[in-house]
Image (cartoon, grey):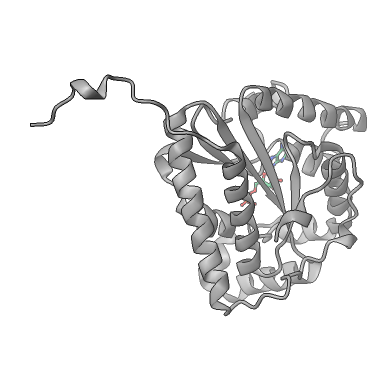
């Protein structure tokens, strides 16, 4: 179902060609939705254990979205199926002075997953060609060079056995308005509101342009981008779970052989 969500390497992304409302004809209360999600979560958990036992490959999942785009909800509802012992979630915030004293990938590299492990990036190195570009935090010649650096970095990870998959949770501007309004209306969501929400929203078109270029330049066979229709949270969860499960199947981890001679072990 999620096959057409991958950005074909070398293609030019136009976000207006991707419908954030898409649900492929499914309905939220169709029992098949819940059973499909549960089955993909089970597949993810089973393959995560094999990945860890095999101790050869790693998986890096990148989540990017506009404010209120559903990164936290996706982590809560989809990654809940994973064993926290072999999975890390890392949230990248405004870089510290120490981060800024280094190249932009320095703070990212140390959080990439080791052998057998899964890491989830809540925001990522892509902020360095998104918020940084939109707010002119560095001169254009600096951020423009970063697409190539990112591709090289992700290639380096791939060479070492790390699969990278990148999700853009695509909501419409109207859906963002409704979600931000809900936050204002619900005291339990007030903590999520920041001063930057409204000014950032005014830069919506600039962000879309920046996302389009990031996905056009950096969707590769070894680290593809997926544009996830995300106005319907339940559909978003289904698609992300399907793609993660499929990626893990494709990685095809194998149980390793025993490290000891089992015939010599007798349990009395
Ligand atoms: P989130 O919105 O992810 O839940 P925050 O509200 O703490 O978390 O926002 C994190 C902020 O950090 C975002 O505004 C994001 O644009 C900013 N940020 C992340 N990476 C960078 C970066 N490399 N340069 C500048 N700002 C960044």
Measured as percent of width and height from the top left, residue 229 is found at 73, 63
Measured as percent of width and height from the top left, residue 128 is found at 77, 36
* Quadrant of the image occupied by residue 105: top right
Front in this rendered view, residue 100 or 208: 208
Front in this rendered view, residue 215 or 174: 215
Front in this rendered view, residue 26 or 199: 26
Whether residue 237 is visible to the viewer of this picture, yes or no, is: yes
Q: Residue at x 61, y 30 (%)?
A: 162
* Quadrant of the image occupied by residue 200: bottom right
Relative vertical location of residue 220 with respect to residue 200 in this rendering, above or below: above
Q: Residue at x 83, y 41 (%)?
A: 214
Q: Which residue ends up furthest to the front in the rendered image?
A: 263
Measured as percent of width and height from the top left, residue 211 is found at 82, 48
* Quadrant of the image occupied by residue 95: top right
Whether residue 71 is visible to the viewer of this picture, yes or no, is: no
**Left or right: where does residue 187 sit relative to residue 98?**
left
Relative vertical location of residue 176 with respect to residue 25 in this rendering, above or below: above
Tell which quarter ligand 1 is in.
Answer: top right
Measured as percent of width and height from the top left, residue 15 is found at 86, 57
Relative vertical location of residue 200 with respect to residue 145 in this rendering, above or below: below
Image quarter where the C terminus lies is top left
Q: Residue at x 73, y 33 (%)?
A: 222
Relative vertical location of residue 58 with respect to residue 199 in this rendering, above or below: above
């Amino acid at each position: 179902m999620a096959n057409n969500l991958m950005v074909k390497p070398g293609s030019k992304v136009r976000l207006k060609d991707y419908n954030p409302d898409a649900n492929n004809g499914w309905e939220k209360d169709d029992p098949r939705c819940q059973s499909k999600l549960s089955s993909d979560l089970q597949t993810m958990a089973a393959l995560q254990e094999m990945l860890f036992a095999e101790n050869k490959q790693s998986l890096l999942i990148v989540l990017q979205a506009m404010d209120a785009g559903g990164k936290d909800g996706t982590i809560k509802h989809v990654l809940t199926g994973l064993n926290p012992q072999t999975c890390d979630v890392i949230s990248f915030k405004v870089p510290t002075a120490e981060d800024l004293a280094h190249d932009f990938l320095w703070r990212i590299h140390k959080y990439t997953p080791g052998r057998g492990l899964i890491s989830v990036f809540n925001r990522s190195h892509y902020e360095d060609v998104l918020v940084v570009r939109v707010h002119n935090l560095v001169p254009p010649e600096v951020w423009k060079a970063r697409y190539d650096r990112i591709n090289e970095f992700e290639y380096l990870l791939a060479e070492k056995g790390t699969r990278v998959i990148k999700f853009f949770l695509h909501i419409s501007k109207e859906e963002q308005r409704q979600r931000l309004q809900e936050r204002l209306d619900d005291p339990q969501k007030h903590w999520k509101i920041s001063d930057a929400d409204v000014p950032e929203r005014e830069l919506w078109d600039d962000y879309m342009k920046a996302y389009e270029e990031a996905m056009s330049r950096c969707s590769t066979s070894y680290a593809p981008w997926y544009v996830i229709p995300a106005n319907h949270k339940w559909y978003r969860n289904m698609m992300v779970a399907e793609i993660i499960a499929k990626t893990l199947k494709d990685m095809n981890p194998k149980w390793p052989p025993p490290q000891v001679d089992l015939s010599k072990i007798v349990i009395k």
